[in-house]
């Protein structure tokens, strides 16, 4: 994701179309939409910069 890359914040990307395990993880979280960004256990559906920045700050990864 460009936003995280520009800030040099490490992340892993999963594609639910090609990765059955990633799809199961999404379903287990009770979610059915993408993109989903998970920061320290908090799932953020869609790109919400304010919420993402707050979650990153709580996790100690200042944007």
Image (spheres, rainbow, N blue to C red):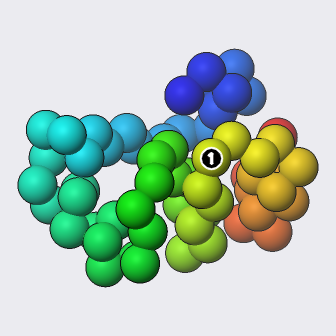
**Is any part of residue 10 visible from this angle?**
yes
Q: Quadrant of residue 26?
A: bottom left
Residue 41 in the image: x percent, y percent?
55, 75
- 20, 41: nearer the viewer: 20
Residue under label 1: 46
Residue 42 in the image: x percent, y percent?
61, 72
Looking at the image, which residue is at 14% across and 60% down? 21
How many marks on residues? Answer: 1
Looking at the image, which residue is at 88% across and 49% down? 50
Asked if residue 47 lies left or right of residue 62, the reply is left
Asked if residue 5 lies left or right of residue 6, the reply is left
**Is any part of residue 62 visible from this angle?**
no
- 27, 7: nearer the viewer: 27
Q: Helix, strand or loop at disc 1?
A: loop
Q: Quadrant of residue 51?
A: bottom right
The residue positioned farthest toward the front in the image shown? 32
């Amino acid at each position: 994701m460009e936003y995280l890359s520009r800030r040099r914040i490490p992340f892993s990307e999963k594609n639910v179309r090609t990765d059955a395990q990633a799809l199961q993880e999404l379903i287990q979280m009770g979610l059915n939409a993408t993109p989903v960004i998970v920061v320290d256990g908090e799932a953020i559906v869609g790109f919400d910069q304010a919420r993402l920045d707050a979650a990153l700050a709580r996790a100690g990864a200042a944007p």
